Image: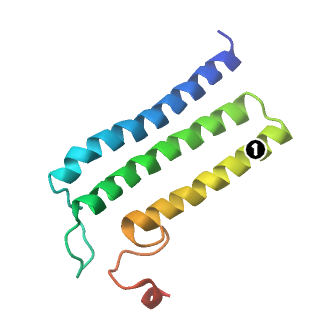
């Protein structure tokens, strides 16, 4: 095996890992939500999560982790195998889209942007 084949294999493995994390996370989240999963740190003054909200949070976390692995796979393949301006441009667009999805999921899961502190105060009060 030459270097390019090894990097391509590592990229495919990372792709498989990303998809696996999302699928396994979706399946494992169902019984956890049905058993009444609650995050350890709920913001002050919030009520317990319903089964639906708990499942959405658990599923969102597995999707976030899977997206991170897929971005890593894209970076590995693009930078190490075919570093052309076109492939780097496509990678930049893919990373931009996935980053937007990650921020959106983080907001959905925690109720705050990733750069906001955990204080329990509304977002307007933190600014």
Does residue 58 appear left or right of residue 21 in this picture? left
Between 84 and 52, which is closer to the camera in this rendering? 52
Q: In the displayed structure, would residue 117 be above or below residue 54? A: below
Between 105 and 123, which is closer to the camera in this rendering? 105
In what quadrant of the picture does the N terminus appear? top right
Q: In the displayed structure, would residue 3 be above or below residue 56? A: above
Does residue 21 appear left or right of residue 97 in this picture? left
Residue to which mark 1 is pinned: 90
Q: In the displayed structure, would residue 16 be above or below residue 121? A: above
Does residue 48 appear left or right of residue 24 in this picture? left
- Secondary structure type for disc 1: helix
Q: Residue furthest front?
A: 52
Q: In the displayed structure, would residue 68 be above or below residue 112? A: above
Residue 43 percent coordinates (x, y):
27, 75
Q: Residue furthest right?
A: 85
Q: Residue at x 47, y 60 (%)?
A: 105
Residue 29 percent coordinates (x, y):
28, 46
Residue 75 percent coordinates (x, y):
65, 39
Q: Residue at x 51, y 46 (%)?
A: 68
Does residue 76 appear left or right of residue 116 in this picture? right
Q: Residue furthest left?
A: 35
Between 113 and 46, which is closer to the camera in this rendering? 46
Q: Residue at x 29, y 54 (%)?
A: 55
Q: Residue at x 24, y 61 (%)?
A: 39
Residue 93 percent coordinates (x, y):
72, 50
């Amino acid at each position: 095996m030459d270097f390019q084949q090894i990097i391509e294999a590592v990229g495919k493995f990372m792709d498989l890992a990303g998809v696996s994390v999302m699928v396994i996370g979706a399946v494992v989240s169902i019984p956890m939500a049905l058993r009444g999963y609650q995050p350890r740190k709920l913001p002050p003054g919030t009520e317990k999560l319903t089964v639906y909200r708990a499942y959405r949070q658990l599923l969102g976390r597995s999707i976030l982790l899977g997206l991170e692995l897929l971005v890593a796979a894209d970076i590995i393949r693009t930078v190490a195998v075919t570093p052309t301006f076109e492939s780097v441009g496509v990678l930049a667009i893919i990373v931009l889209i996935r980053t937007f999805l990650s921020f959106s999921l983080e907001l959905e899961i925690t109720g705050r942007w990733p750069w906001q502190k955990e204080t329990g105060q509304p977002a307007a009060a933190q600014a």
